[in-house]
Amino acid sequence: MPENLRILRRKREIVGEIQQITRAMKLVSAAKLKRALTWREATREYFSEIETALAVVLARVGPGFTHRYLTERPVERLGLLLVAGDKGLCGAFNANVVGAAREFVRRAPAHVQTMTVGTRTAEMAQRARLNVVREFPAVHERRRGADVQEVGRHILGAWDAGKLDAVHVCYSQFISRVSSRPVVERVLPAQMPEGASDPEPQILEPGAGELAVALLPQYVLARLFQALLASAAAEHSARLMAMTAATDNAQDMIEQLTRHVNRARQAQVTRELLDVVSGADALQSQR
Amino acid sequence: MPAALGVRILTPMGEVLDTRAVYLRVTAWNGLLGVMAGHAPMVAQLTVGALRLTGSGGDVRHFATTGGVLRVTRRGALVLVDAAEEADGIDVERAREALERAQHRLAEATAESVDVARAELALARALNRLQVADQARP
C-alpha cells in the first residue's frame, strides 16, 4: 500500500518539524535560565543586605516602636499574590503553583482575594475558581524593575488603605535546575528574622525609628522582587526540562516511525517483486 | 597614600559597582555625607541624589542614585538603592523626556491625588540624573 508509506513518511516529517521547534525552545530556555539565575542571585544578595540593615535598625528602636507593616491584626481579608508564568509549554509549572494556591485558599481562615502575576496564571486561577481581583502580566526581563514596582505599589497601597489584613505570596521556589517547589510565604505583616543583628555600636542617621520607617517598604518590595525573580528562574528551568523531554520523545518517535517506514517500504518492494515474479510465471506457463 | 575603602552599590536589578575608593560622598537625608576608610559602623538613609567616588589616583566617578540606605561596616561601604547609574551612562535625552513628563503630570494632577507623590519623585529622579550627568562633564 503506497498510500500507507506516504502517510508514514509525512508523519515522520511532521514529528521532525515539531522537534526542531522544541529544540529551539529548549535552547532559548537554557539561555533565559542562565540570565534569570544571575538576576535572581543579585536580587537575593540585595534582599539579604536590606534584611541585615533592617535587623540592625530594628534591634535599636525602642520597645514602643510600631509600624503598620509589622503590626498583626485580626485576619478578615487575606490577600494572595499568585506568581507563575505568561505561557504554557513548561510542564506542570503553572498547575503546581495554582494547586498550591487552591490548597492555601481551602485552608485559609478568611476570605482570600487573589492577585495574579502572569496571563496564564490568571486564566488558570479563574478556572480553579479562585477569587481573582487583580491581574498583572508576568515580569518582563528588561522592565523587571518597573514591573515589580507596579505589583508592589498595588499591594502596599491596598495594605495602607486597610483593605487587606495579611498578604501572602505563592510562587515557585527555584531549588536547582531540575527541581522547584511551590511555596506560600507571608509578606505582610513583615516577619523579621531573629537575631542576626550586628552587635557593634552603630551610628544611625537619622534615628532608628526613621530608618526603620524608610527601610520597611524597601524590604517588602525587595522580598516581592526576590519571589518574582525566583519564579522566573523556576519557569525557565521547568520549560527547559519540558522541552528537553519533548525533544527526546520526538527523537524516539522519529526512530519508531523510521522503522515503520522501512517495514512498509520493504513490504511494498516484496509485493511488487511478487507481482513481477507471478506475472513472469504466468507468462511462462502460457508458453 | 590614604587607605582605600571598599565600596559596593547593590540594586534589586544587580550589582552596579564593586570597587575601592579613598573617599565616598553620598546624598544622605540631611545633606552630603562623606565616608573614608576606617569609618565607624553606620546606617544612613539616602535620598535621591549624587554619589561621588574619589579613587586613589584622584580620579572621580559620579553616579545618580535613587533613595535607599548606606551601610558602613568594617568591611566597607554598601549602598543599597533602587537604582544607580554612572554619569556617563545616563541618557540625557531620556532623562529630559522623563522630566517633562513628570512636570506635565504635576501640572495636571489635583492636590489630593495620590499620584502627586509619585510624580514628584519621578521629577526629583529625572532632575538628579540631569544634574549628575552635567556635573560629570569636563
Image: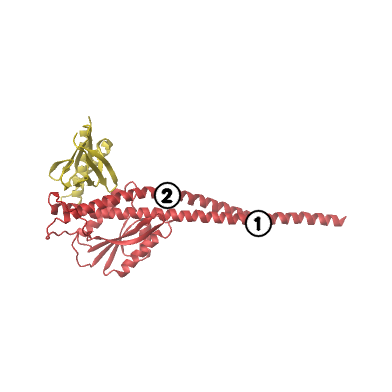
Residue B56 placed where, x, y %? 22, 34
**Residue B112 visible to the viewer:** no
Secondary structure type for disc 1:
helix
Secondary structure type for disc 2:
helix
Label annotation for residue A30:
2
Residue A255 placement, left or right of A83: right
Q: Quadrant of the N terminus of chain A?
A: bottom right
Residue at coordinates 86% horizontally, 57% vertically from top-left? A285
Task: Rate crowding at label 1 as few (under 14), some (14 to 19) or many (20 or more) other CA atoms within 10 Å.
Answer: few
State the separation of the CA atoms marked 2 and 1.
Answer: 38 Å
Residue at coordinates 27% horizontally, 42% vertically from top-left? B18
Residue B105 placed where, x, y %? 21, 45
The scheme the figure's colours follow is by chain
Tag 1 residue: A263
User: Chain A appears what colour?
Assistant: red
Q: Which chain is yellow?
A: B
Q: Quadrant of the C terminus of chain A?
A: bottom right
Residue at coordinates 12% horizontally, 58% vertically from top-left? A62
Residue A246 placement, left or right of B113: right
Of B133 and A216, nearer the camera is: A216
Residue B120 placed where, x, y %? 18, 46
> Of the residues under marks 2 and 1, which one precedes in the sequence?
2
Q: How many marks?
A: 2
User: Which amino acid type corresponds to the residue marked 2 in the rendered image?
Assistant: Ala
**Residue A1 visible to the viewer:** yes
